[in-house]
Image: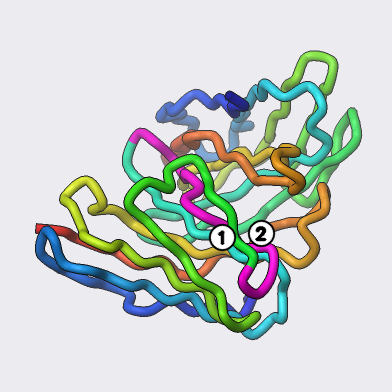
């Protein structure tokens, strides 16, 4: 298994509070991704990173920000959590970002916003 | 908008049968295609990748690609109850200077004894 961990694994928070999710990898892969997964919507890309301090938006980036200060860590922040951000969040990594590159997923974080 | 489409199912097949899962994609320039399996409450795991037209076999799994029809499929032979899961089709699409993986919504497969 690819060395990817996510923390926390479960979190319950209240509307309006800030939340930060962490993804940590030990594979030294260049690319890192944050997805959310909701019933009926599949996996949707929030943000991705193609190197330290290099990030870009995905399909559903509104309300989320990211940071990557080290190759191994990619943080996802919900500045002011809303109930619509209740979801399962997956981090993924890939090595080169080339067309044939495959992704490996972390175990996921289940976030509930009350 | 670039899209990947899958029938959400559930697809129900008896044990020992062939399960056929289908996926279409909108970006004609896409070159790389992937099938992931996701058990309930778990993260997706890669089971097959395919890059060229035709068939690619790996054990009980066969991926089929037809770029002209923008269609990719996954066949599971001798289906087992342990194959019951959601199968996600993914396509690496060129966007903004990077290949961005785009996922379908997944097809739920149920293999009943």
Q: Check if mark 1's residue and mark 2's residue have beta carbons within 8 Å.
A: yes
Q: Which of B66 and B55 is in front in this view?
A: B66
Locate residue B99 relative to residue A34 in the image: left or right.
Answer: right
Q: Say above or below: A86 vs A93.
A: above
Locate residue A81 relative to residue A52 in the image: left or right.
Answer: left
Is residue A43 part of the magenta span, yes or no? Answer: yes
Q: Quadrant of the N terminus of chain A?
A: bottom right
> Would residue B24 be visible to someone looking at this image?
yes
**Percent position (x, y) of residue A17?**
16, 67
Mark 1 or mark 2: whose residue is earlier in sequence: 1
Where does the magenta region start and end?
A40-53
Q: Which residue is drawn at 52% across and 39% down?
A: B15
- Name the secondary structure under disc 2: loop
Predominant secondary structure, magenta span: strand
Q: Mark 2 sits on what residue?
A: A103
- Please identify the quarter of the rendering in which residue A31 is found: bottom right
Q: Numbered disc 2: what chain?
A: A
Q: Mark 1 sits on what residue?
A: A33
Q: Which of B46 and B99 is in front in this view?
A: B99
- Name the secondary structure under disc 1: strand
Q: Which residue is drawn at 49% across and 40% down?
A: A59
């Amino acid at each position: 298994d690819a060395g990817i961990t996510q923390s926390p694994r479960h979190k319950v928070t209240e509307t309006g509070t800030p939340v930060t999710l962490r993804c940590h990898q030990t594979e030294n892969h260049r690319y890192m991704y944050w997805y959310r997964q909701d019933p009926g919507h599949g996996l949707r890309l929030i943000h991705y990173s193609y190197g330290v301090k290099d990030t870009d938006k995905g399909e559903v980036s509104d309300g989320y920000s990211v940071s990557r200060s080290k190759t191994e860590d990619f943080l996802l922040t919900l500045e002011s959590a809303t109930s619509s951000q209740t979801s399962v969040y997956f981090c993924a990594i890939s090595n080169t970002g080339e067309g044939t590159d495959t992704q490996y997923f972390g175990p996921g974080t289940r976030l509930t916003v009350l | 908008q670039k899209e990947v489409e899958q029938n959400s199912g559930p697809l129900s097949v008896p044990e020992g049968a062939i399960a056929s899962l289908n996926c279409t994609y909108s970006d004609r320039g896409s070159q790389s295609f992937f099938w992931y399996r996701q058990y309930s409450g778990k993260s997706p795991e890669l089971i097959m990748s395919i890059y060229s037209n035709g068939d690619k076999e790996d054990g009980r799994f066969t991926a089929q690609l037809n770029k002209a029809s923008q269609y990719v499929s996954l066949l599971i032979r001798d289906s087992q109850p342990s194959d019951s899961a959601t199968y996600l089709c993914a396509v690496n699409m060129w966007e903004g200077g990077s290949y961005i993986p785009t996922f379908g919504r997944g097809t739920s497969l149920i293999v009943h004894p």
